[in-house]
Every structure is written in C-alpha cells, then in structure tokens.
C-alpha cells in the first residue's frame, strides 16, 4: 500500500473499515455495510445517478446482494490524507456462489471523519470486465 504521508491511524482505520465492509457483504448485511458510510455519503455506480444517504445506500447494497453477491475482496493500493479526510485507491473483486467471479475492478473512496470515526464519504468504482457484445446479426 503506497502511503507516503498518511498516519498509521488512518491506514488502520481504513483497513478496519474495509474489513467491516467485506464482513458485511459476506453476511449479506446491507444495513451493516451502509453504517460504514457518512450520513450524507454517496455511492456513485455506473449507469445510475448518485445514491446519497445511509437509507438509500442500504437499499442499493440490498439490491446488489440480492442479485447474487456472496463475497468481496478489497486491496488498498494507495492511501493518503489526514485524520479528518483521506482517500484510498484500490482493487476489488465480487464473488457469487462457489466463489464464482462476478466482477473485478478498481475503486476510489474518500474517507471522512464523522463522530470521531473515519467513514466512507464517496465511493466510486469501475469494472475491469468487458461489456458483453450486443446480441444480433
């Protein structure tokens, strides 16, 4: 993990947040996943408007989990910032039943301190998988 100026506290807080997110996905617990975001946090998925606030984020993750996501892996590549606001660049993998690969890609997360704890404030990702070829001729 590249993290030239970031404090050990920030690195540990982000690692703990990521571990909690992965655990929530593995338990199929969208409420726990949403609790890791700031009150006005946003997820910024492709093909969708921004989804803001914990209730909407919980609904988003419930829909994703109901579509078959059974597990996630996150790998931080770069972290920088302060105790109040930091960013993370990383890689993700989402798996389904029997560890079937559903998606893999990269992400950027902005972490912000809320109530004394670093939480996900902005969350955007993009797949590495090619879109399926259009059906037809």
Image (spheres, rainbow, N blue to C red):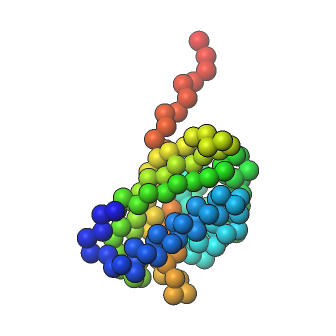
- Give the x, y percent position of residue 65: 69, 53
| Above or below, comparing residue 78 to residue 8 in the picture | above
Give 63 or 25, whichever is nearer the viewer.
25
Q: Residue at x 61, y 39 (%)?
A: 100
- Give the x, y percent position of residue 18: 52, 66
- Res. 47 visible in picture: no
Quarter of image, res 60: bottom right
- Give the x, y percent position of residue 86: 39, 73
Give 80 or 52, whichever is nearer the viewer.
80
Q: Dividing the image into 4 quarters, which one contains the N terminus?
A: bottom left
Residue farthest toward the bottom in the current orientation of the protein: 116
Q: Dividing the image into 4 quarters, which one contains the C terminus?
A: top right
Quarter of image, res 76: bottom left
| Above or below, comparing residue 48 to residue 83 in the picture | above
- Give the x, y percent position of residue 105: 46, 47
Q: How many marks?
A: 0
Residue farthest toward the right in the current orientation of the protein: 66
Judge left or right: residue 127 versus residue 99: left
- Res. 115 visible in picture: yes
Residue farthest toward the front in the current orientation of the protein: 98
| Above or below, comparing residue 63 to residue 116 in the picture | above
Judge left or right: residue 51 versus residue 113: right
Q: Residue at x 51, y 62 (%)?
A: 123
Q: Residue at x 46, y 71 (%)?
A: 14
Give 131 or 24, whichever is nearer the viewer.
24
Q: Residue at x 57, y 24 (%)?
A: 134
Residue farthest toward the left in the current orientation of the protein: 4
């Amino acid at each position: 993990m590249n993290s030239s100026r970031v404090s050990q506290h920030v690195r540990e807080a982000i690692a703990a947040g990521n571990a909690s997110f992965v655990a929530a996905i593995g338990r199929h617990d969208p409420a726990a996943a949403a609790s890791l975001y700031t009150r006005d946090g946003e997820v910024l998925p492709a093909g969708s408007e921004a989804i803001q606030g914990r209730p909407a984020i919980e609904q988003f993750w419930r829909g994703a989990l109901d579509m078959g996501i059974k597990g996630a892996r996150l790998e931080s590549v770069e972290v920088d910032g302060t105790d109040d606001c930091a960013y993370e660049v990383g890689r993700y993998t989402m798996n389904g039943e029997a560890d079937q690969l559903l998606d893999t890609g990269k992400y950027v997360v902005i972490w912000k301190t809320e109530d004394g704890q670093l939480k996900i404030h902005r969350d955007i990702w993009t797949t590495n998988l090619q879109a399926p070829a259009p059906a037809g001729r």
